[in-house]
Amino acid sequence: MAQWRSFLYMLPQIWRVLARKPETVSYPFGPMELPPGFRGHVTVNAEKCRGCSLCVRDCPADALALEKDSRKQYRLIYHPDRCAYCGQCELSCAFDAIHMTSDFVRGSTQRATFTTKLVDHKEDDEKET
Ligand code: SF4
Ligand code: SF4
Protein backbone atom coordinates (compact mmCIF):
# COMPACT_ATOMS: atom_id res chain seq x y z
CA MET A 1 0.00 0.00 0.00
CA ALA A 2 2.87 2.35 0.91
CA GLN A 3 4.48 1.63 -2.48
CA TRP A 4 1.29 2.70 -4.27
CA ARG A 5 1.19 5.90 -2.27
CA SER A 6 4.82 6.66 -3.27
CA PHE A 7 4.01 5.92 -6.88
CA LEU A 8 0.97 8.22 -6.84
CA TYR A 9 3.10 10.92 -5.21
CA MET A 10 5.78 10.60 -7.91
CA LEU A 11 3.38 10.37 -10.86
CA PRO A 12 2.92 14.15 -11.46
CA GLN A 13 6.68 14.70 -11.16
CA ILE A 14 7.41 11.94 -13.67
CA TRP A 15 4.84 13.47 -16.00
CA ARG A 16 6.44 16.93 -15.67
CA VAL A 17 9.90 15.57 -16.50
CA LEU A 18 8.63 13.64 -19.51
CA ALA A 19 6.67 16.61 -20.84
CA ARG A 20 9.39 19.27 -20.71
CA LYS A 21 12.09 19.96 -23.32
CA PRO A 22 15.44 18.15 -22.90
CA GLU A 23 18.06 20.11 -20.93
CA THR A 24 20.98 18.68 -22.92
CA VAL A 25 21.99 19.82 -26.43
CA SER A 26 21.87 17.54 -29.44
CA TYR A 27 25.33 18.59 -30.70
CA PRO A 28 27.00 17.17 -32.85
CA PHE A 29 23.69 15.97 -34.37
CA GLY A 30 22.20 19.46 -34.30
CA PRO A 31 23.43 23.06 -34.20
CA MET A 32 25.21 24.28 -31.08
CA GLU A 33 23.87 27.51 -29.58
CA LEU A 34 26.68 29.42 -27.91
CA PRO A 35 26.01 31.89 -25.08
CA PRO A 36 26.60 35.63 -25.65
CA GLY A 37 30.19 36.62 -24.89
CA PHE A 38 31.51 33.15 -25.72
CA ARG A 39 35.27 33.36 -26.39
CA GLY A 40 36.18 31.06 -29.23
CA HIS A 41 39.34 30.41 -31.19
CA VAL A 42 41.68 33.06 -32.55
CA THR A 43 41.74 34.43 -36.07
CA VAL A 44 44.14 36.83 -37.80
CA ASN A 45 43.69 39.37 -40.55
CA ALA A 46 46.79 38.42 -42.53
CA GLU A 47 46.77 41.79 -44.34
CA LYS A 48 47.26 43.62 -41.06
CA CYS A 49 49.76 41.23 -39.44
CA ARG A 50 53.34 42.55 -39.44
CA GLY A 51 55.03 39.52 -37.92
CA CYS A 52 56.10 41.50 -34.87
CA SER A 53 55.54 38.49 -32.53
CA LEU A 54 54.04 40.56 -29.69
CA CYS A 55 51.13 38.11 -29.52
CA VAL A 56 53.55 35.18 -29.37
CA ARG A 57 55.57 36.82 -26.60
CA ASP A 58 52.49 37.55 -24.47
CA CYS A 59 50.60 34.28 -24.98
CA PRO A 60 50.62 32.57 -21.58
CA ALA A 61 49.79 29.16 -23.03
CA ASP A 62 52.45 28.93 -25.73
CA ALA A 63 49.63 28.59 -28.26
CA LEU A 64 51.17 30.89 -30.88
CA ALA A 65 54.47 30.57 -32.72
CA LEU A 66 56.14 32.76 -35.31
CA GLU A 67 58.37 31.06 -37.85
CA LYS A 68 60.42 33.84 -39.37
CA ASP A 69 62.70 33.39 -42.39
CA SER A 70 63.21 37.11 -42.98
CA ARG A 71 61.53 40.42 -42.16
CA LYS A 72 58.97 39.86 -44.93
CA GLN A 73 58.70 36.08 -44.88
CA TYR A 74 57.04 34.56 -41.83
CA ARG A 75 54.30 32.23 -40.68
CA LEU A 76 52.11 32.64 -37.60
CA ILE A 77 51.12 29.24 -36.23
CA TYR A 78 48.21 28.65 -33.84
CA HIS A 79 47.72 25.64 -31.56
CA PRO A 80 44.07 25.80 -30.39
CA ASP A 81 44.59 22.67 -28.28
CA ARG A 82 46.95 24.72 -26.06
CA CYS A 83 44.95 27.98 -26.17
CA ALA A 84 43.46 29.20 -22.88
CA TYR A 85 41.06 31.56 -24.74
CA CYS A 86 42.20 34.41 -22.54
CA GLY A 87 42.26 37.10 -25.26
CA GLN A 88 45.71 38.42 -24.33
CA CYS A 89 46.95 38.17 -27.94
CA GLU A 90 44.13 40.47 -29.04
CA LEU A 91 45.11 43.01 -26.39
CA SER A 92 48.81 42.79 -27.24
CA CYS A 93 48.58 43.24 -31.01
CA ALA A 94 49.45 46.82 -31.93
CA PHE A 95 48.12 46.36 -35.49
CA ASP A 96 44.57 45.19 -34.67
CA ALA A 97 45.33 42.01 -36.61
CA ILE A 98 44.46 39.21 -34.18
CA HIS A 99 40.97 38.67 -32.75
CA MET A 100 38.97 36.16 -30.77
CA THR A 101 36.02 34.67 -32.67
CA SER A 102 32.76 33.39 -31.22
CA ASP A 103 33.26 30.01 -32.88
CA PHE A 104 34.74 26.89 -31.32
CA VAL A 105 37.17 24.30 -32.62
CA ARG A 106 35.62 20.95 -33.48
CA GLY A 107 36.95 17.93 -31.62
CA SER A 108 39.38 15.41 -33.05
CA THR A 109 41.37 12.42 -31.84
CA GLN A 110 44.36 13.64 -33.89
CA ARG A 111 45.95 16.48 -31.91
CA ALA A 112 48.21 17.55 -34.77
CA THR A 113 45.17 18.37 -36.94
CA PHE A 114 44.33 21.33 -34.68
CA THR A 115 47.47 23.26 -35.64
CA THR A 116 46.61 26.09 -38.02
CA LYS A 117 48.73 28.47 -40.09
CA LEU A 118 47.06 31.83 -39.43
CA VAL A 119 49.46 33.87 -41.54
CA ASP A 120 51.73 32.71 -44.35
CA HIS A 121 53.48 35.83 -45.52
CA LYS A 122 55.82 35.42 -48.45
CA GLU A 123 58.74 37.64 -49.42
CA ASP A 124 57.02 38.89 -52.60
CA ASP A 125 53.62 39.66 -50.96
CA GLU A 126 52.92 43.36 -51.36
CA LYS A 127 52.61 45.19 -48.06
CA GLU A 128 53.31 48.61 -46.65
CA THR A 129 55.85 48.51 -43.84
S1 SF4 B 1 43.72 33.61 -26.47
FE1 SF4 B 1 45.33 33.59 -24.88
S2 SF4 B 1 46.10 31.49 -24.85
FE2 SF4 B 1 44.95 31.74 -26.76
S3 SF4 B 1 46.47 32.33 -28.29
FE3 SF4 B 1 45.63 34.23 -27.45
S4 SF4 B 1 47.02 34.78 -25.77
FE4 SF4 B 1 47.40 32.63 -26.27
S1 SF4 C 1 49.03 39.20 -35.01
FE1 SF4 C 1 49.62 41.24 -34.32
S2 SF4 C 1 50.97 40.89 -32.56
FE2 SF4 C 1 50.81 38.95 -33.68
S3 SF4 C 1 52.57 38.92 -35.08
FE3 SF4 C 1 50.82 39.77 -36.21
S4 SF4 C 1 50.98 41.98 -35.94
FE4 SF4 C 1 52.30 41.07 -34.37
Image (cartoon, helix red, strand yellow):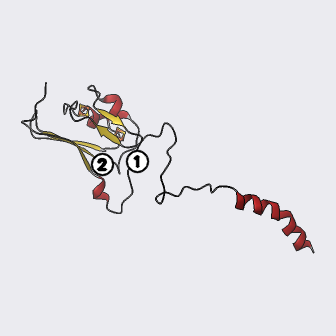
Q: Amino acid at mark 2?
A: His
Q: Is residue 2 left or right of residue 116?
A: right
Residue visible at 47% across and 52% down? 31
Look at mark 2 in the image and give the residue it sits on: 79
Quarter assignment of residue 85: top left
Where in the figure is residue 123, as x and y percent of width and height? 7, 37
Answer with mark 1 or mark 2, whichever residue precedes in sequence: 2
| Front residue of 28 and 100 | 28
Q: CA distance from mark 1 to mark 2?
A: 13 Å
Where in the figure is residue 118, as x and y percent of width and height? 24, 42
Image mark for residue 104: 1
Please rate how many residues cluster around mark 1, counting C-alpha atoms within 10 Å: few if below 14, some from 14 to 19, many from 20.
some
Q: Is residue 49 left or right of residue 68?
A: right
Spot the residue most to the right: 1
Q: Is residue 52 above or below residue 80?
A: above
Residue visible at 19% across and 30% down? 50
Where in the figure is residue 57, as x and y percent of width and height? 27, 35
